[in-house]
Image: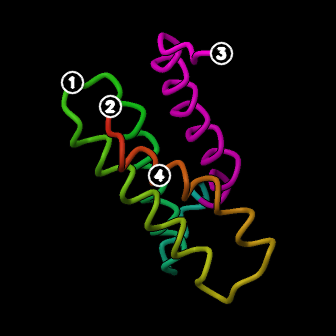
Amino acid sequence: MNPIKSFIPAATWLLRIFVLVLVYQKYFDTFISFSFNGIYYYLVLAMVVMAMVLFVGGFVKKHAMTMIAGFFIFGISTFLMFWTGVGVDKVMAHLPLSVLGFCFLARGNS
């Protein structure tokens, strides 16, 4: 059975929406606390901004915005996985965003 290649744009948009929902679910409470006294808040702030940039990057023809957002989402998620020690719970919590960031870094808007 051959894959249905016409579904790829819809699947890409669903992945973008999933990144927004996942970032909202995981980091929004920290984001609205406006606690500027720790590095964790700045990482969460960057994650929220980059998730929005990733979504907006889908409307732009060039790949740069999507790839930069994917790079930062991948980097921040990977850093948060190993920040205070490795545990299965932490890896499972941050791995989906890390993988999706890497996917958008590698593919861009294509």
Q: Residues within 10 Å of mark 4 (few under 14, many from 20)?
A: many
Q: Amino acid at mark 3?
A: Met
Q: Answer yes or no: do the residues labelled 1 and 2 have beta carbons within 8 Å?
A: yes
Q: Quadrant of the C terminus?
A: top left
Q: Position of residue 53 (x, y in %)?
A: 36, 40
Is 52 left or right of 26, judged from the image as shown?
A: left
The residue lying at 36 percent from left, 48 percent from top is 106
Task: Quickly name the residue at label 1.
Answer: 61
- Whichever of callouts 3 and 1 sits on the residue coming sooner in the sequence is 3
- Whichever of callouts 1 and 4 sits on the residue coming sooner in the sequence is 1
The residue lying at 75 percent from left, 64 percent from top is 92
- Is 13 within the magenta? yes
- Is 93 within the magenta? no
Name the secondary structure under disc 2: loop
Q: CA distance from mark 1 to mark 4?
A: 19 Å
Q: Which residues are magenta?
A: 1-30
Q: Position of residue 33 (x, y in %)?
A: 61, 60
Task: Quickly name the residue at label 2.
Answer: 109
Q: Position of residue 37 (x, y in %)?
A: 50, 80
* Main SS category, magenta section: helix
Task: Quickly name the residue at label 4.
Answer: 101
Q: Amino acid at mark 1?
A: Lys
> Can you name the residue that lies furthest to the bottom here?
85
Name the secondary structure under disc 4: helix
Task: Quickly name the residue at label 3.
Answer: 1
Q: Answer yes or no: do the residues labelled 2 and 4 have beta carbons within 8 Å?
A: no
Q: Amino acid at mark 4?
A: Gly
